[in-house]
Image: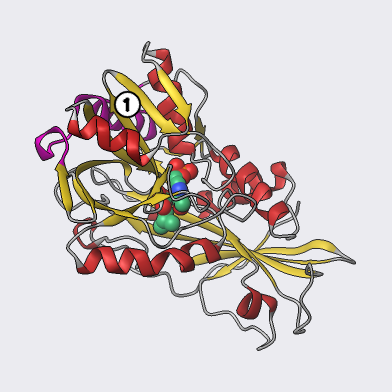
Amino acid sequence: MEIKIVKTDHPAQKPDAATLGFGKIFTDHMFVMEYSHEQGWHDARIVPFGNISLHPASTVLHYGSEIFEGLKAYRRADGKVQLFRPMENIRRMNNSAERLCLPQINEEDGMQILDTFVSLEQDWVPAAEGTSLYLRPFLFGNDETLGVHAVHNAVFMLIASPVGSYYKEGINPVKIMIEDEDVRAVRGGTGYAKCGGNYAASNRAGQRAEEKGYSQVLWLDGVERKYIEEVGAMNVMFKIDGEIVTPKLTGSILPGITRKSCIEVLKEEGYTVHERLLSLEELEKALRDGKLEEAWGCGTAAVVSPIGELRYRDEVFTINNGEIGEVTQHLYDTLTGVQWGKIADTRGWIHPIG
Ligand code: PLP
Ligand code: COI
């Protein structure tokens, strides 16, 4: 694939690592290409970062035909830049595209786009502890008509944002509220796809939790509101009576790459990991019997995020005295160790740039 590059005349000053939040600052360039039924993907280019112009009837603005991905570029101590399991993101984006009737991208082209873009922007990958360059590929339907149907035109873009450590002071346990009214996704719906609409639908519950002093919600399944699904925009795992339990991928759960990596590390190390249905009733019983030893969310942005408190209606349960547990800490150390190149990559997870 040929990628045209138009460099900016006004490169921005790189931000101070201390001022990095999440997704507030963007790099100098962005990748764009268009799709039409007739031409397929075309006009692949990297151009100066800036606003885009859309027809007011563009599909994405009316019917939410949008999918995205999230992965990071990490700077190693020796200065080199690397990605973590990027092919997993490309494949998941294509699965999301299939669900939303959006065009897919050839896997090799996807890798070439990531390689070319990150290589051009590599000075933007911060070096301070816990920082990285968050990459946000996204793809949207762009027919200029109000008819409801699978699109004939689409746009794929890639932008990047230098980000800090997800938490202000290391990895602090968070307080989570169990949500039994709104649901994030239903089986047969779009839960397994990373589409913008899933996030729009989850904001009301997230906002209600925040108003009560909680960071996020624990989602239950959309049919019976009986089984645990995810935590906020992360997958969730529990250590119950010495064994690891995580909800199985039923179709309404996003197949997280961090989730998959945690399972692989834990199994390699001899832990018993169950991917199965986990009911709220079983979780409550484990909490009451003192058998819920650890709980954590996992996702690219935070890597792992320990859950220190769970609230269900008016009842509050503390987990592991509100402290990070041993397995949670170990997973954090192992995954971040490989991502920043402090631990040897024995699993073929690392994709070097350049
Ligand atoms: N679940 C949801 C709903 C997400 O948005 C994410 C974030 O990407 C995850 C889980 C975790 O996925 P990953 O580990 O691939 O980042
Ligand atoms: C994650 O990386 O864990 C996320 O959920 C990303 C979020 C900003 C959508």
**In the image, residue 317 above or below residue 326:** below
Q: Which residue is mark 1?
A: 334
Q: Return the residue nearer the eye: 10 or 311.
A: 311
Question: How many residues crowd mark 1 within 10 Å: few (<14), some (14–19), many (20+)?
Answer: some
Position of residue 60 in the picture relative to residue 128 (left or right): right
Q: Secondary structure at mark 1?
A: helix
Q: Is residue 281 above or below residue 153?
A: above
Query: Can you name the residue that lies furthest to the left here?
Result: 321
Q: Is residue 25 visible?
A: no
Residue displayed at 50% across by 28% down: 349
Count every numbered label the image shows and give the total: 1
Is residue 133 highlighted in magenta?
A: no
User: Where is residue 71 shown, x and y percent of the image?
Assistant: 47, 47
**Image point 43% across, 25% down: which residue?**
263
Tell me what residue is drawn at x 26 percent, y 20 percent. Answer: 241
Front-lying residue, 121 or 336: 336
Q: Is residue 119 visible?
A: yes
Vertical side of 353 occupied by 191: above or below: below
Q: Is residue 161 left or right of residue 30?
A: left
Overall secondary structure of the magenta section: helix
* Callout 1 amino acid: Thr
**188 shown above or below 331:** below
- Res. 194 image quadrant: bottom right
- Residue 319 lies, in percent from the top left, at 17, 37
Identify the residue at horizontal 35%, vertical 41% (top origin).
280
Instruction: Please say whether residue 335 is one of the residues in the magenta stretch.
Output: yes
For the rendered model, the colour scheme is: secondary structure
Q: Position of residue 348 (x, y in %)?
A: 52, 24
Q: Which residues are magenta?
A: 318-343
